[in-house]
Image (spheres, grey):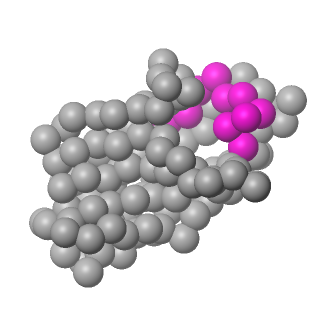
């Protein structure tokens, strides 16, 4: 079992920056991938960014060059630095981790005003 606790998020003006973090606990040694998804009102949940235990990253085209995903040395915490935010980035952001099954955080709201 893996537990994920997110922090960060909030309200920011377009062009601004925000950072999210997600702390994992439990069977963290079995985690192979961590990352972030988001879900805007009326839309499906979509991938934002992923990072593997080996450090490989994958980003949605819509956030490439603006968002950066990283982990700490213990691989217990995953971060998402979001720069040049746009109103269309407004969504609930969910932390994600996978072992042989998928785990989700509770979600944190990010609102970007125009």
Residue 31 location (% of width, % of height):
20, 62
Asked if 11 appears above or below 99 in the picture, the reply is above
Quarter of the figure with the C terminus: top right
Front in this rendered view, residue 30 or 17? 30
Residue at point 64%, 23% (across, down): 84
Residue at point 21%, 66% (across, down): 99
Asked if 104 appears above or below 79 in the picture, the reply is below
Front in this rendered view, residue 112 or 43? 43
| In the image, residue 84 lies in the stretch drawn in magenta | yes
Residue at point 56%, 27% (across, down): 62
Quarter of the figure with the N terminus: bottom left
Q: Residue furthest bottom?
A: 1
**Range of magenta residues:** 81-90
**Residue 62 falls left or right of residue 73:** right
Asked if 17 appears above or below 47 in the picture, the reply is above
Q: Is residue 8 visible?
A: no
Indicate the quadrant where residue 57 lies.
top left
| In the image, residue 66 lies in the stretch drawn in magenta | no
**Residue 101 falls left or right of residue 40:** left
Residue 28 location (% of width, % of height):
20, 68
**Residue 48 falls left or right of residue 111:** left
Residue 103 location (% of width, % of height):
37, 69
């Amino acid at each position: 079992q893996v537990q994920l606790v997110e922090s960060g998020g909030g309200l920011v003006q377009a062009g601004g920056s925000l950072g999210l973090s997600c702390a994992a606990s439990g069977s963290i040694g079995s985690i192979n991938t961590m990352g972030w998804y988001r879900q805007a009102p009326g839309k499906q949940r979509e991938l934002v960014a992923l990072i593997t235990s080996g450090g490989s990253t994958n980003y949605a085209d819509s956030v490439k060059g603006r968002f950066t995903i990283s982990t700490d040395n213990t691989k217990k915490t995953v971060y998402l630095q979001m720069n040049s935010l746009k109103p269309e980035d407004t969504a609930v952001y969910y932390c994600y981790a996978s072992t042989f099954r998928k785990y989700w955080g509770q979600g944190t709201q990010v609102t970007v005003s125009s």
